[in-house]
Image: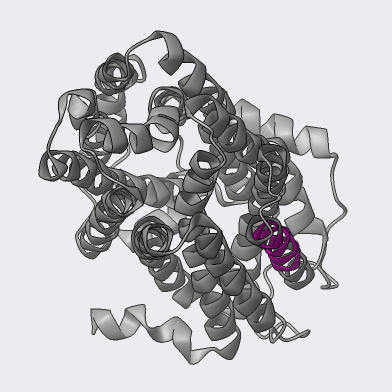
């Protein structure tokens, strides 16, 4: 019965179109993560040059994510999704052509990565906003669960693995061409989205007569920030997430390929399979966590799972075995998946409904705010500091910060004062239940 419930969104044509396009698009994104790395290396670049390209992508994402949220509320989401996929296709097709003609340069990759980052900033708010318009409310949880399972499998596992094979067997340019094919297919599919909304419109949805007058953008953002600051469990979880991105994302995205190359003597296939191990672990853990009841100590479990799951990262610089490194990435992926499912549930069940959109946008923005900094610093720091020390510090800093967040926000007291034991009761009290401050 639970399996049938999870598949109910597929009964709706618009969801089938949307999830098909999303799946192919994120598969291409996973291929790009590996193809871009080895295209930089093919051009003679090292950690510093890879930092430049990775930073450009994260700047595009972080710099435009709030604008993406505003656009998703004020413009037709269907057109936004089509426009983003069209831009993705144009960028990747151009890079493919330049690479095949052997005229590709590093600045081409940096500009392309920036545009792709901007596309992400507009795509996912639009995707989140269109779901309630094409699905009944009862099917939204299943739809989000499907997306949460598909994403790590395709973006972190299958996509990187295939790209690694293509790079090793042919060239980075052929892997980039594979990304272009993915975005071509996704662009073609999203154009089948109906111009009419098939789902039940929510109050205030674009194009309905119940749409209220829009308030000031700055007033809306200020209200979201104010709620976040007044809610310790939310504030300190976001602070932890922001700092963990600073310590971990840069080393994993920028320096891990060189760990594979220098410590293990591996190539793109090994790097791709390591990312695949992390992605599969995250997907399995997310699906398993979603199948169980929310822990009574939900804040404690979430924060400590995230924090302690970073410990294996501290040992990456000392590992000389693929299986040891794979185990470290598996643990990191599993704990990420567990924490993410609990976190998403908390936002839906404890944040007042009228603030949920803004808090979700702020969550995305704050959590990724230091991603460009992490990307930009990883390469230059690796020029003067041993890579093993960078991973060691990052892997130890995150558990320490997790304990700080747990105790400063008094999460263990908060979760007892605000139990989440019944879906029905929580849904009825989400707008009014006070948070411990």
Where 255 falls versus 91 (above or below)?
Answer: above
In screen coordinates, is 399 left or right of 41?
left
Residue 57 image offset from top left, x and y in percent: 62, 41
Residue 39: x and y, percent? 53, 47
| Residue 292 belongs to magenta span | no
Of residue 257 and residue 236, the one placed in the foreground of this image is: 257
What residue appears at the point 73 percent right and 58 percent down from the top-left corner?
A: 72
> Residue 76 appears at what percent x and percent y?
80, 68
* Quadrant of the image containing the N terminus: bottom left
Task: Kindly identify the residue that appears in the image at 69 percent across and 61 percent down.
Answer: 88
Closest to the observer, 133 or 88? 88
Magenta stretch prevailing secondary structure: helix
Query: Which quadrant, please, contains the C terminus?
Result: top left
Any part of residue 136 in sight: no
Whether residue 147 is situated above or below residue 326 in the rendered picture? below
Q: Is residue 424 left or right of residue 34?
A: left
Q: Is residue 48 visible?
A: yes
Q: Which of these two is toward me, 233 or 79?
A: 79
Left or right of 244 in this view: 111: right
Q: How is the image coloured?
A: one colour
Q: Which residues are magenta?
A: 85-97
The percent coordinates of residue 431 (x first, y second) are: 53, 48
Identify which residue is drawn at 15% across, 43% down.
Answer: 322
Q: Residue at x 23, y 32 (%)?
A: 300
């Amino acid at each position: 019965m639970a399996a049938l419930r999870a598949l109910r969104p597929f009964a709706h044509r618009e969801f089938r179109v949307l999830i098909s396009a999303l799946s192919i698009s994120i598969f291409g994104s996973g291929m790009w993560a590996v193809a871009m790395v080895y295209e930089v290396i093919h051009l003679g670049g090292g950690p510093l040059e890879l930092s430049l390209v990775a930073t450009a992508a994260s700047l595009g994402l972080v710099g435009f994510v709030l604008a993406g949220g505003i656009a998703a509320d004020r413009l037709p989401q269907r057109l936004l999704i089509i426009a983003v996929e069209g831009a993705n296709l144009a960028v990747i097709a151009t890079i493919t052509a330049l690479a095949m003609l052997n005229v590709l340069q590093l600045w081409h990759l940096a500009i392309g990565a920036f545009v792709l980052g901007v596309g992400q900033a507009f795509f996912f708010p639009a995707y989140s906003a269109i779901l309630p318009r094409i699905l009944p409310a009862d099917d939204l949880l299943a739809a989000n669960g499907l997306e949460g399972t598909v994403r790590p499998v395709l973006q972190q596992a299958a996509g990187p693995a295939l790209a690694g094979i293509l790079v090793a067997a042919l060239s980075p340019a052929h892997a980039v061409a594979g990304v272009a094919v993915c975005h071509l297919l996704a662009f073609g599919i999203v154009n089948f989205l109906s111009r009419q909304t098939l789902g039940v419109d929510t109050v205030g949805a674009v194009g309905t007569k119940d749409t209220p007058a829009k308030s000031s953008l700055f007033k809306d953002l200020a209200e979201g920030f104010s709620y976040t600051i007044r809610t310790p469990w939310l504030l300190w979880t976001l602070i932890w997430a922001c700092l963990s991105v600073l310590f971990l994302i840069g080393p994993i995205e920028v320096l891990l390929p060189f760990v594979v190359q220098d410590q293990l003597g591996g190539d793109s296939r090994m790097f791709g399979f390591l990312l695949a191990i992390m992605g599969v672990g995250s997907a399995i853990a997310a699906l398993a966590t979603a199948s169980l009841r929310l822990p009574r100590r939900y804040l404690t479990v979430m924060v400590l799972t995230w924090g302690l799951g970073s410990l294996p990262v501290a040992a990456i610089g000392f590992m000389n075995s693929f299986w040891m490194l794979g185990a470290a990435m598996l643990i990191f992926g599993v704990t990420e998946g567990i924490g993410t499912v609990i976190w998403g549930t908390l936002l839906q069940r404890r944040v007042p409904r009228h603030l949920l959109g803004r808090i979700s946008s702020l969550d995305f923005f704050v959590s990724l705010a230091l991603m460009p900094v992490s990307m930009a610093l990883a390469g230059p720091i690796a020029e003067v500091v041993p890579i093993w020390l960078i991973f060691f510090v990052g892997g130890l800093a995150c558990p320490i910060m997790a304990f700080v967040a747990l105790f400063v926000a008094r999460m263990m007291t908060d979760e007892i004062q605000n139990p989440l034991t019944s879906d029905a009761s929580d849904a009825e009290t989400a707008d009014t239940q006070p948070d411990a401050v």
